[in-house]
Image (tube, rainbow, N blue to C red):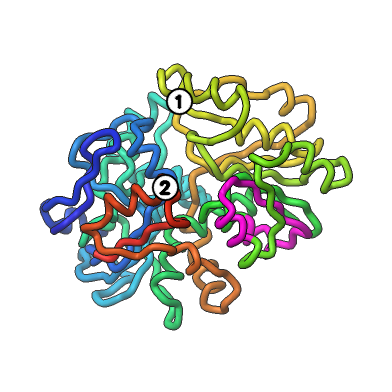
Amino acid sequence: MRALCWRGVNDLSVEDVPDPVILNDQDAIVKVAATTTCGSDLHLIDGYVPAMESGDVLGHEFLGEVVETGPGVDRLKKGDRVVVCSFISCGRCWYCEHDLWSLCDNSNPKPGIAAALWGYETGAVYGYSHAMGGFRGSHAEYVRVPFADYGAFRVPDGVDDETALFASDAAPTGWMGADLGGVGEGDVVAVWGCGAVGQMAAQAATLLGAERVIVIDRFRERLDMAERHIGAETLDYTATDVGAELRERTGGRGPDVCIEAVGMEAHGTGPQHLYDSAKQRLRLETGRPQALREAIQACRKGGSVFLLGVFVGWVDKFPVGALMNKGLTVRGAQQHGQRYIPKLLDLMAEGRLETRQFATHAMGLDAAPRGYNMFKHKRDGCVRAVFHP
């Protein structure tokens, strides 16, 4: 089969790789109908995530048709149209039973790398380095889905592929940020990052009762999309002092909930951005946390900050004094998709959750290197490139 492979930093190629086969009785094989780029993939492509190997198949956000199941699969059958959660989870360990699916104890067959980085291993992710299991990704014609009964979800009739696709990762990730960030009725919510995940966090905040949602980015077409589809207020951080503007818009108090949806390659302005960029290139810190610093500084006293953007290791100049003295609650997580995906598919079926707009550029799998180039450099208004193998 054909698949998009990582060959080195900023080096991608579409190649022939072996077809996946059933290895365990709880596996399913899914024929991929649609798979999309994700901002966290750029950290792999740019070489900031360890444990990548030449030939690794990329991609973790996908939808397709079940073509084969192992004898232990009970909930799915051949021919089902399914969206697959990006995190692989067993459904039986303590973490899965407590709805902390991305922390699964049993899905990552290479736990030593993650344990060395973070103290404990996490669950596995399709196509996201050997630290996260070394599983082949979704930018391929077929994918093996372990623990399929817990990771693949039937798509309701009437929900098209381009809408349901984002229930794999972007929608549950954004929803989790608003939910675990504690968004409630009447809150003012600020979201850093206006890609698909940031817009989903903003949309979730609105559906959870926020009175006002303010989205922060520098790309006008993305800000316009958030205004048009969500009704969010917007801020261009290159044109204003974000902290001062958020104070002004909230009567001096600051947002109740701040959600960082940018991650370890955040852009910014001023000396801090130059400092972070230089140190990251020299591998003296692993992430550029300018958006996270800004969110912590901007959040009201006693407020909540949720970290959605992917970080791998260490960052400099973390404002721990602001965190402690302002009495902030700071949380972060990789998405617990199995907790949210069924509900999100229902909301999509009801027409209450919009995601199709993110699929700005559709193309075949052979064009995937070009699609990632467009996505990385935000060319032609690209929010997400979607590949149809």
364 w.r.t. 265: above or below: below
Q: Judge left or right: residue 216 versus residue 299.
A: left
Q: Quadrant of residue 79?
A: bottom left
The residue tagged with tag 1: helix, strand or loop? Answer: loop
The front one of 200 and 327 is 200
Would you say residue 270 is visible in this rendering? yes
Q: Judge left or right: residue 349 versus residue 79.
A: right
The residue indicated by pointer 2 is 93
Question: What crowding class fits label 1: few (fewer than 14 Cα within 10 Å), some (14-19), or many (20 or more)?
Answer: many
Asked whether residue 296 is drawn in magenta, I would say no
Residue 388: where, in percent of width, then height?
A: 28, 66
Q: Residue at x 71, y 56 (%)?
A: 233
The front one of 381 and 246 is 381
213 w.r.t. 66: above or below: above
The front one of 148 and 227 is 227
Residue 154: where, in percent of width, then height?
A: 39, 72
The residue tagged with tag 2: helix, strand or loop? Answer: loop
In magenta, the rendered stretch is: 202-226
Disc 2 and disc 1: Cα gap in Å? 31 Å
Q: Residue at x 47, y 19 (%)?
A: 279
Residue 204: where, in percent of width, then height?
A: 63, 60
Please identify the quadrant where the N terminus is shown. bottom left
Task: Look at the numbered discs 2 and 1 and tell me whether their residues touch, using CB distance below 8 Å.
Answer: no
Hey, what amino acid is under mark 1? Answer: Thr
Residue 348: mark: none
